[in-house]
Image (spheres, grey):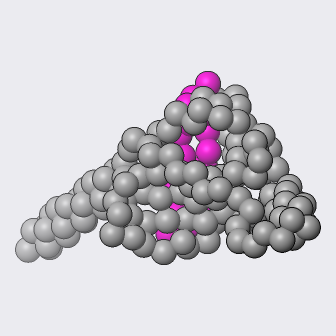
Amino acid sequence: MRKQIARGLTMLMLVVGLAFASAAVANGQSRQLTANVPFDFVVADKTLQSGQYRVRKEGIAGEVITVRSADEKDHLYRVTANAGSSGDSRTRLVFHRYGSTYFLSQVWIDGSGRQLAETKQEQAAERELKKIAAYHGERGPVYQVVELIAAR
């Protein structure tokens, strides 16, 4: 009788373990994107060259993103905030463009977004462009939002 209970518990644990492993694999597949970025851009005060990048959500809630170049030369981690969810399931990267400089702002995978904090460099660019715009009597955003659709 004890052997049957032990076997039953072992089988149950095996099934539960396999279910968790399958969920982790499926979850991992939908938590990353691949994008060919056609311009240089800034992440974490570091300028990355144009090219192919893999962006992956890490952590339980995807609170950390990893940006890795295809040639493995660049590999950055950034803590992010929740940018909400959207009915738009497109996987995409959102950049803020100040003049000719692009800053990675958001990462969207399967309708769930993560917001990167503004870097000191981005804040300085925004302050400078606001001064210029105010001098010319202009109001409104001083940056352009650029969305880059990516593959999963």
Read off the magenta span: 52-71
x, y percentage for residue 147? 52, 51
In this rendered view, identify the residue nearer to me: 3 or 122.
122
Quarter of the image where the C terminus is located = top left
Task: Report whether residue 24 is seen.
Answer: no
Image location of residue 26, percent across then percent down:
31, 53
Quarter of the picture holding the N terminus: bottom left
Q: Nearer the viewer, residue 111 or 134?
A: 134
Q: Residue at x 24, y 60 (%)?
A: 19
Residue 49 counted in the magenta span: no
**72 in relation to 127, above or below:** above
- What main secondary structure does the magenta stretch of the protein show? strand
Specify whether 72 is left or right of 15. Answer: right
Image quadrant assignment for residue 68: top right
Residue 63 placement (x, y as % from top left): 58, 66
Depicted 119 relative to depicted 53: above or below: below
User: Looking at the image, which residue is at 74% across and 62% down?
Assistant: 142
Q: Quadrant of residue 13?
A: bottom left
Taking the image as shown, residue 131 lies to the left or right of residue 116, namely right
Task: Describe residue 100's horizontal placement relative to residue 89 as left or right.
Answer: right
Residue 66 covered by magenta stretch: yes
46 or 21: which is nearer to us?
A: 46
Residue at 91 percent across and 67 percent down: it is 135
Task: Pick whichever, 136 or 47, lies toward us.
Answer: 136
